[in-house]
C-alpha cells in the first residue's frame, strides 16, 4: 500500500456486545436479549470507518493474539482494502484484548475490559505515518501515547486526540484537535461548565477543541478561539459504542477533503448519529452518500 492519509494509533481488540433490559445487581439476575461480536478499540474503529469512507488509513497500537478472538478480528480488519495492517503485531503467546459491553435500552454501555493494559504495545515511530497528514490517537494506554503525540507533531502531522480533558495533561500541548465527551468531563469534574472548560483547553493547546454531548449540541472552539455549535440529528439509539470513533472519522474525512471546520464537524455528527442505530462500533457501516445527506440537514450556529 502507498501513502496514507491518516494513521490510527491505540486500542485494537474485540467487543462482545450484550443487550440487556437493565444492569444486574447483587439481588437481580439479568437475562441478555442478544450477544454479538464486533471490531473493538478506538484506533481500530476509527481506522475501519475511514477505510470504508475511502480514506487510506494505517493502524497500530497494542498487539493482538493468534487465538480465536485474534483470528476473527484479523478477518474483519482484512476485509477493508484501504486499511494498512502491516504494523499490527500478532503474537502467539498473548490473548487478544476484548471488552464485554452491557448495553441497556437507552443505548448506554457498561464495560468490562480484558487484557488491554498488559498487552504489549508497538512503539510509535514517525516512519509509520508514511505521508499521513493526521495521527488519530486515543489515550487509553501508557507513556507510548504521549510519545506518539510528540513524535507526530515533530514530524509535521496533526494529532486528533480523544478524551484529553485535563488542562495539565502532558499530551494537550501536542494535540491539534481534541474530541472530548461532555458526559466524561462531567463525570470527572462534577458541576463544571463544559463550554468554559473547552475554552480553557483550547487556550493551552492552541488547537481545535470539540465537545460532543450525546444528542445535545456539539460545542466547537476553533484555532482562533471562536466558537460555534452543531446540532446533531435526532435518532433512535440502539448502541452508543464507538460513536465518538465514528465522529472522529467523519471529521477527518471532511478535513482531508479540504472542507471547512463546520462542514467537517457536521460530517462527524452525521457519522456518529448513524452509528448509534446499529450494534457494534464498526460493523454495519453506512455508505458515504448517506452520511453526506444527513450532514446536509445539520444546523451550525455561531456562539
Image (cartoon, rainbow, N blue to C red):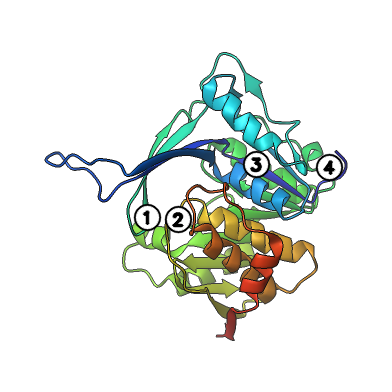
User: Of residues 223 and 210, which is closer to you in this image?
Assistant: 210
Residue under the point 59% across and 86% down? 302
Q: Which of marks 2 and 3 is nearer the N terminus?
A: 3
- Frontmost of labels 1 and 3 is 1
User: Within 10 angstroms of label 1, few (less than 14), some, or many (20 or more) residues?
Assistant: some
Q: Distance between the residues labelled 1 and 4?
A: 37 Å
- Frontmost of labels 2 and 4 is 2
Residue under the point 18% across and 39% down? 29
User: Pointers 1 and 4 in contact (CB under 8 A)?
Assistant: no
User: Pointers 1 and 2 in contact (CB under 8 A)?
Assistant: yes
Q: Distance between the residues labelled 2 and 4?
A: 32 Å
In what element is the residue under mark 3?
Answer: strand
- Frontmost of labels 1 and 4 is 1
Question: Looking at the rendered structure, which numbered label has been put on residue 108?
Answer: 1
Q: How far apart are marks 2 and 3 (CA)?
A: 21 Å
Residue annotated with mark 2? 240
Quadrant in the picture for residue 206: bottom right
Work out which residue is located at the far bottom of the displayed protein and give it. 302
Which percent across, then down, holds residue 181?
47, 61
Residue under the point 27% across and 51% down? 21
Residue under the point 53% across and 26% down? 69
In what element is the residue under mark 2?
Answer: loop
User: Within 10 angstroms of label 4, few (less than 14), some, or many (20 or more) residues?
Assistant: some
User: Pointers 2 and 4 in contact (CB under 8 A)?
Assistant: no
Question: Looking at the rendered structure, which numbered label has been put on residue 130?
Answer: 4
Amino acid at each position: 500500500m502507498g501513502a496514507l492519509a491518516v494513521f490510527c494509533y491505540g486500542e485494537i481488540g474485540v467487543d462482545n456486545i450484550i443487550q440487556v433490559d437493565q444492569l444486574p445487581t447483587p439481588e437481580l439476575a439479568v437475562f441478555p436479549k442478544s450477544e454479538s461480536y464486533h471490531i473493538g478499540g478506538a484506533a481500530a474503529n476509527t481506522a475501519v470507518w475511514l477505510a470504508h469512507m475511502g480514506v487510506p488509513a494505517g493502524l497500530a497500537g497494542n498487539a493482538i493474539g493468534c487465538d480465536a478472538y485474534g483470528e476473527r478480528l484479523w478477518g474483519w480488519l482484512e476485509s477493508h482494502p484501504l486499511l494498512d495492517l502491516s504494523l499490527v503485531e500478532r503474537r502467539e503467546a498473548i490473548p487478544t484484548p476484548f471488552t464485554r459491553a452491557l448495553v441497556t435500552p437507552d443505548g448506554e454501555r457498561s464495560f468490562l475490559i480484558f487484557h488491554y493494559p498488559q498487552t504489549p504495545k508497538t512503539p510509535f515511530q514517525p516512519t509509520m505515518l508514511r505521508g499521513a497528514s493526521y495521527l488519530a490517537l486515543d489515550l487509553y494506554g501508557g507513556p507510548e501515547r504521549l510519545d506518539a503525540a510528540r513524535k507526530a507533531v515533530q514530524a509535521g502531522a496533526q494529532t486528533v486526540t480523544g478524551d484529553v480533558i485535563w488542562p495539565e495533561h502532558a499530551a494537550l500541548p501536542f494535540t491539534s484537535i481534541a474530541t472530548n465527551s461532555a458526559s466524561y468531563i462531567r463525570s470527572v469534574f462534577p458541576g463544571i461548565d463544559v463550554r468554559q472548560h473547552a475554552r480553557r483547553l483550547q487556550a493551552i493547546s492552541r488547537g481545535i477543541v470539540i465537545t460532543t454531548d450525546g444528542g445535545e449540541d456539539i460545542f466547537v472552539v476553533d484555532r482562533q478561539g471562536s466558537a460555534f455549535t452543531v446540532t446533531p440529528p435526532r435518532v433512535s439509539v440502539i448502541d452508543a459504542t464507538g460513536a465518538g470513533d465514528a465522529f472522529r472519522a467523519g471529521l477527518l474525512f471532511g478535513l482531508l477533503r479540504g472542507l471547512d471546520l463546520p462542514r467537517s464537524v457536521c460530517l462527524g455528527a452525521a457519522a456518529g448519529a448513524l452509528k448509534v442505530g446499529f450494534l457494534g462500533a464498526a460493523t454495519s457501516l453506512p455508505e458515504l452518500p448517506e452520511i453526506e445527506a444527513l450532514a446536509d440537514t445539520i444546523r451550525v450556529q455561531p456562539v
